[in-house]
Image: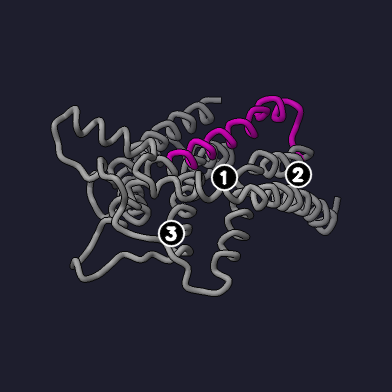
Amino acid sequence: MSFLEHLEELRWHILRSIFVIIIVGIVCFIMKDFIFDTIIFGPKKMSFPTYKFLCESARFIGFETNFCGTEFPFIIQNRTMGGQFSAHIWTSILGGFIISFPYVIYELWKFISPGLHTNEKMKSGGTIFICSLLFFLGVLFGYYVVTPLSINFFGSYQVSNEVLNEIDISSYIALVRSSSLACGIMFELPIIIFFLSRIGVVTPSSLIKYRKYALLIVLTFAAIITPPDVASQFIVAIPVMILYQISIFISRLVLKK
C-alpha cells in the first residue's frame, strides 16, 4: 500500500471509532439522571464510598477529620444560558469515549496488525485487554481517590467566612474529567514503556538512571491534579512510581528477549 492508501485506511478506522463513541455517547445522553446524579455529582456527597472509608479510618486511629461531615459547604450553579446543555453534551461524549476505549484500541490494533509477523501478533495478542484494563484502573483511581480529595480540599477551602463557594458547573465537571482522564492515561505507562523498549528508545539502565527525574516529574504532575497538600500528592505519586518500577521490569524482559 502507498502512503495515501495507508492514510485512507487509517481514516476509516478513526471514523468507525468516532461512530461508536457517538452511539455510546447518545446512550449516556439519554441516561442523564444516572450519569449526573450518581456518577458526576457522587463525589460531592458525603455518602460517597471514599469519604466513608476515610471517616471510618480516621475514627479508628482517633484523628479528627472533615470527612465525617454531613455536606460540603459549597453549591454548584450554572451562570450561562446554555451551560447545563453544554455540560450535558460534553459529559455524554466523554462518557462515550471512556466506555468505548477498548473498541478504540481495537481499531488501532486492526490498523497496526497487518504490518506484524504471525509470531509478533501472537505475542501481542493481549495488548487490547491490558491497555483497557490499565486505562479503566486509572480512571477508577482518579474518580475514587484523586477527585474526592480535590473536591474535599477546594470545596471546603475559604479565605474568609464572608466568601461563599458557589462553583460553576463547568469548573466542577472539568475537575472530575481531568482527574479521571489524567489518571487513566497515566496508568498506560507500562504499555508505553513496552513499545519504547521494543523499538530501542528506552532501556532498563536509562530508566534506572533517570528515575530521580521521573520522580520529580511524577510529584509535579501529582501536585497539578491534586490539592496542594503533601498527603494527597503522595497518594497519587505512590501508584505512579509503582507503575514506573513495573515499567523497568517490563523493559528488562523486552531487552532480555
**5 and 157: which one is in front?**
157
CA–CA distance between discs 2 and 3?
Answer: 37 Å
Q: Mark 2 packing: few (<14 Cα in 10 Å), some, or many (20+)?
A: some
Q: Are marks 2 and 1 in contact (CB under 8 Å)?
A: no
Q: Residue at x 66, y 43 (%)?
A: 100
Say how the picture is coloured.
one colour
Dot 2: what SS? helix
Q: How many marks?
A: 3
CA–CA distance between discs 3 and 1?
Answer: 17 Å
Q: Give how far across and how far down residue 226 sits, in percent.
A: 33, 52
Amino acid tagged 1: Phe
Dot 1: what SS? helix
Residue at label 2? Answer: 111
Q: Give how far across and how far down residue 95 sits, in percent.
A: 60, 49
Q: Earlier in the sequence, mark 2 or mark 1?
A: 1
Q: Is residue 171 above or below residue 247?
A: below
Q: Majority secondary structure of the magenta segment?
A: helix
Magenta stretch contains residue 117: yes
Amino acid tagged 3: Tyr
Residue at label 3? Answer: 172
Residue at label 1? Answer: 34
Query: Is residue 106 shown left or right of residue 162?
Result: right
Q: Which residues are magenta?
A: 115-141
Q: Are marks 3 and 1 in contact (CB under 8 Å)?
A: no
Quadrant position of residue 241: top left
Q: Give how far across and how far down residue 185 sits, in percent.
A: 51, 46
Residue 179 in sight: yes
